[in-house]
Amino acid sequence: MSTNKKSSRTITVAALARVEGEGGLTLQLRGGRVADVKLRIYEPPRFFEGFLRGRDFREVPDVTARICGICPVAYQMSSIHALEAACGVSVTPEIRALRRLLYCGEWIESHALHVFMLHAPDFLGYESAIHMAKDHVEVVTKALELKKIGNDLVTVVGGREIHPVNVKLGGFYRAPTRLELAPLVERLKRALALSLEAVRFTAGLEFPGFEPDYEFVALRHPDEYPFNEGRIVSSRGLDIPVAEFEEHFVEEHVAHANALHCVHKGHGAYHVGPLARYSLNFDRLPGIARDAAREAGLGTECRNPFKSIVVRAVELVFACHEALRIIGSYAPPEPASVAVPPRAGSGHGASEAPRGMLYHSYQIDADGLVRKARIVPPTAQNQRTIENDLRELVPTLLELPREELTLRCEQAIRNYDPCISCATHFLKLDVREG
Amino acid sequence: MKACRARRLVVGVGNPDAGDDGAGRAVARRLAARAPAGVIVRECAGDAAALLDAWRGFDEVVVVDACRGAGPPGSVHQLRAEDLADFTGLGDTSTHSFGVETAVGLARALGTLPRNLVIHAIEGHDFEPGAPLSPAARRGVDAVVLSLSSPR
């Protein structure tokens, strides 16, 4: 294996592991510099926006939920908010709280999976969670327990753990009773304790010194750490209502990917996800999550993408705490949904999927048929930032043996918990030399 | 979940709304009505964490799942956990849901692999969303139901 900086080489990861969907990475190195980085997304495009046209607006939440098996709630939430906005309907505080509770379940499930099963093996030098499990039985056992609690929360509120069926425009088909939520309290207390342990565990990992000057973009709400609502804000002063997203962000086709690259007009690449949410909303976290973050050595902002694993653990603390808070004051919404009569118009919605902001917009006619749909998933927004990270990171890693360099690149991609299935509505590594 | 030593668990795995992928679930549904005493029947979408949870405490576990590319449609393949010994790399194709092989690998690593784990894999050929079970997969289901419902 050549470590000769003067040579020209290409490193290829044909198929990226531990990411959702099918993609790969090609790094073209020339004279010790990165000549080109291409995150190749070859999972076929899925044309959701196309086949939603002409369908009844009430079908949209369940159809778009099918885009992803790990963040279906995000798709349901962004779509219902967009469609309710189009119809000029707002829901009751009780329905809103129940939506946040459902989202807590998805964050717990998704973050527990990514932190322990997908990302931690990178830091501890294992090929997979299975290899890691042999030496870290307790860590993996607790991770599975935590994920299961998230799954169970989604099941109770959403009707089933994958692709929940209880969400509809205007609210829920049926609201869970207080009695049905009660058994979750002790389990969520256990999940909270496991999440605090997760923060300590991840804080003890080793992180490369790498802090790019990102433009962070996330939702921001006056009182809450963001799930369903808020204005779109950035670390460089952007502060817009969700309805203005398309005036400021544009999706571009690139030849090497079946997913569109989304950029901030006039600014370029930006960063969505846990680091952005945390850095823009630290003051909105409950005390217990802020304290855990401080003990983990995090400041009020975090720019090291490798530390996203710690931030996800802090967000686990938040999600468990928030779920307990909501259940503590839960009163079943009565009725479980409000009427959403169709009217001709357009609506926009954004919510914070576990891996970042998810934007939807719809145009419907007076009969409620979809005329136009637009879905901008978090991974599409992060693709260019992932390529930029690799462009900046790889020159510092060229002395590493090829296998280690490849693994480090994959780890850098997994910092984003990318969902290729979502982005093509997306990964594998190729480092080429010669 | 309480320990269920000395009892036998049958878990039907798959997606009942994706054609032949529902074969394992179909077996579980048919067997639930006629399971011999001492046999517990469960259904599972196939997520590894859920499977680990489903078989916790059982010494004897039968997993019924659909498969593809191992023989003619409708054929049934029996595998033991040991046959999957080298199967630690299946997480390589997806991340957000781990399947049966990952569950076996994880359980082995965590020391929670049931002492006796058999996998019945029914070969399917039509995995289209919304499609019913194909006649061939149905024959495979019949064969597995018959073999699992007879007292041993």
Image (cartoon, rainbow, N blue to C red):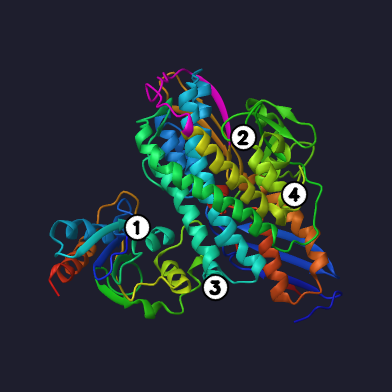
Figure disc tally: 4
* Amino acid type indicated by mark 1: Met
Quick one: label 2, few (<14), some, or many (20+) residues within 10 Å? Answer: many
Which quadrant is the C terminus of chain A positioned in? bottom right
Residue A339 located within the stretch drawn in magenta:
yes
Mark 2 → mark 3, Cα distance in angstroms: 35 Å
Mark 4, mark 3: which one is toward the viewer? 4
The circle on residue A298 is 4
Mark 2 vs mark 4: give the one in front: 4
Instruction: Give the residues drawn in magenta, as a range.
Output: A328-351
Say whether residue A147 is magenta: no
Q: Which residue is mark 2?
A: A226
Q: Earlier in the sequence, mark 2 or mark 3?
A: 3
Quadrant of the snapshot with the N terminus of chain A: bottom right
Residue B10 makes an appearance in the image: yes
Image location (x, y in percent) of residue A195: 57, 51
